[in-house]
Amino acid sequence: MKRTLILNGLLLLTFWCNAQTSNSELKNVRKIIEASNAIYADLANKNDGSILTIYTEDACLFPPNASPSGR
């Protein structure tokens, strides 16, 4: 009985997790976020200050092991 309950719980968890990833709207949002992250990473790797244009006027970046930079 205990084994059956555990198996049913695992199957339910598997189906629930699978249901979270099958939504096409979520896939589109994920693509948009990944594209934004790629732009951010590219600009951050180049130490380009133009990355701050996507934030508010008083924004400041705090990169690790570096001094803060702002507009």
Image (cartoon, rainbow, N blue to C red):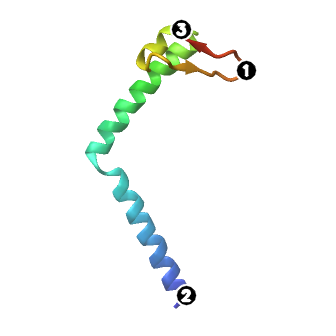
Residue 48, label in figure: 3
Pointer 3 and pointer 1: residues touching (CB < 8 Å)? no
Q: Which residue is mark 1?
A: 65
Amino acid at dot 1 = Asn
Marks 1 and 2, how far apart in space?
Answer: 52 Å
Depth check: give the residue in front, 40 or 54.
54
Residue at 42 percent of width and 30 percent of height:
34
> Residue 70, percent across and down?
56, 13
- Return the residue found at the far front: 58
Give the total number of marks visible in the rendering: 3
Residue at 62 percent of width and 22 percent of height:
62
Residue 2, label in figure: 2
Amino acid at dot 3 = Asp
- Left or right of 6 on screen, residue 20: left
Q: Is residue 63 above or below residue 30?
A: above
Q: Is residue 4 above or below residue 57?
A: below
Pointer 3 and pointer 2: residues touching (CB < 8 Å)? no
Dot in front, 1 or 2: 1
